[in-house]
Image (spheres, grey):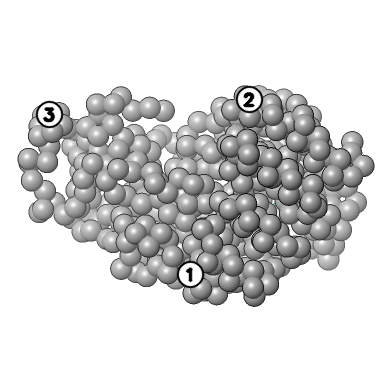
Amino acid sequence: MAVSRGQKQIFDFAELVTLQGAAAKDGRRVQEKDLSVISQARMLVVGGEIVWLGRQKNFKASLLKPFGGAKAFRQHSFKDSCALPGFVECHSHLVFAGSRQQEFEERNRGVSYEQIAQKGGGILSTVRATRRASTQELLSLAQDRAQRFLRQGVTVLEVKSGYGLSRAAEIKMLEVAQKIRGPEIVPTFLGAHARPPEFSSADEYIQYLMDKVLPLIHKKGLARRIDIFWDKGYFHSPAAKSFLLQAQKMGFEICGHVDQLHSLGGVRELLELRSLSLDHVVQLSDPDLTRLARSSSTAVLLPGADFYLRMKYPPARRLIDEGARVALATDFNPGSCPTQDLSLIGVLARLEMKMTLPEVLTAYTYGGAAALGLQSRRGSLEPGKSADFVLLKGGWQDLFYSVGHHPVTEVWLAGRKKSFAF
Ligand code: NIG
Ligand code: FE
């Protein structure tokens, strides 16, 4: 959705939460002052990119001269609104068919997520439904879900494959992801999500992914990122590591579901590959926690999954205090986290993981952008970055307080107002 290069805009806000301080600290050890809030703020945007921002009283008309002067600019006055960077939802399984509500009931009777998977349910049950669905059916489901994220203020949305588990079905999922409109979509290939029944061993399936699927995804340009479920009963062998290495050599970026159910050395393996993010990290050992905190990778925390699976939460406080950069996301999927509600995720982060509100805001913006390798363009509002912002009724302090309350009134992506039906 390119903006005509020349579009020039002036935005005035009662309050602008820029997160410049948080970005300067690369999203680590963030305090309230790092939200870098400007009151009576003005922001100049040219061709979807921020060229200046500051207090209205510090604005000088001469700033407009290089862009053709005041007449070239369209003025937008949001004098009663607070603006902040758009949310980056950096971990979602948005494309799927079917429902797993009967598993919710089973888990509630005490059957575990792993036991359900061993009986052929879980991920494989969604695989069966997703394989059966047509591209059009999947797209219509995914498009509605993307709108649901957009209207909560999500401007960048990561979308994983992983419910196809065959070349044709994985490609179908990624082609659907490519067609979703609304937020900026970042597609991720998660062929290594579970072993499909056609293969008798995980390594045999990994070999198939390497030989037959990865090259085609590369050739078609359907994803730049590779994800893997590194866990017991899923993938954790030397062959899995070779798969990631080969993907990296081909130019893919790496990320992984790691230490969700068990700690199987995935943290070290993925850090060695300079994985952009390590996601879940619930079962972290002390040395792995320190390694992750000191690394360049982002720890993506998914408390919605821990809530629904009634598991323990990741050690957010210790990660942050040891200097980790963290992101928050829903992990939206039909099994471990069937909600898209950002307000629930933020409240769980605050209540169950003891994150402060400025930490939650940073994790859902700059942290998410860094998890996707996009922090040079997104995740904070400053010159040189994309004008991705949301307007709020009330102040930023109202966010992530009341579950189900969504105070976002407008969503702008690269200087363009997005429309959505409430
Ligand atoms: O992130 N852990 C692996 N994948 C998903 C769950 C997918 C599913 O249950 O369908 C997760 O929790
Ligand atoms: Fe996930």
Name the secondary structure under disc 1: loop
* Residue 158 image label: none
Question: Looking at the picture, which amino acid does disc 2 mark?
Answer: Lys
Q: Residue at x 76, y 36 (%)?
A: 209
Disc on the earlier residue, 1 or 2: 2
Say which label, 1 or 3, has the lower sequence index.
3
Identify which residue, 375 or 87, lies in the foreground. Answer: 375
Q: Tell me how far mark 1 sits from mark 3, CA to CA.
A: 45 Å
Query: Horizontal and vertical percent for residue 63?
Result: 12, 41
Task: Tell me the residue that label 2 is attached to.
Answer: 219
| Residue type highlighted by circle 3 | Gly
Residue 242's x, y, as percent? 74, 45
Task: Tell me the kind of residue under disc 1.
Answer: Gly
Q: Please tell me whether mark 2 or mark 3 is closer to you in this view.
A: 2
Q: Is residue 28 above or below residue 376?
A: below
* Among the 4 quarters of the image, the one containing residue 250: top right
Query: In this picture, is 133 found above or below 39?
Result: above
Q: Quadrant of the N terminus?
A: top left
Relative to 154, is 254 on the left or the right?
A: right
Q: Disc 1, disc 3: CB below 8 Å?
A: no
- Residues at badges 2 and 3 in contact (C-beta under 8 Å)? no
* Image coordinates for residue 298, horizontal then vertical, percent: 53, 57
Name the residue that disc number 3 marks. Answer: 68
The residue tagged 1 is 323
Q: On the picture, is 399 further left or further right than 382? A: right
| Residue 296 visible in the current orientation | yes
Which residue is rendered at x = 44% and y = 36% of the image? 420
Q: Earlier in the sequence, mark 2 or mark 3?
A: 3
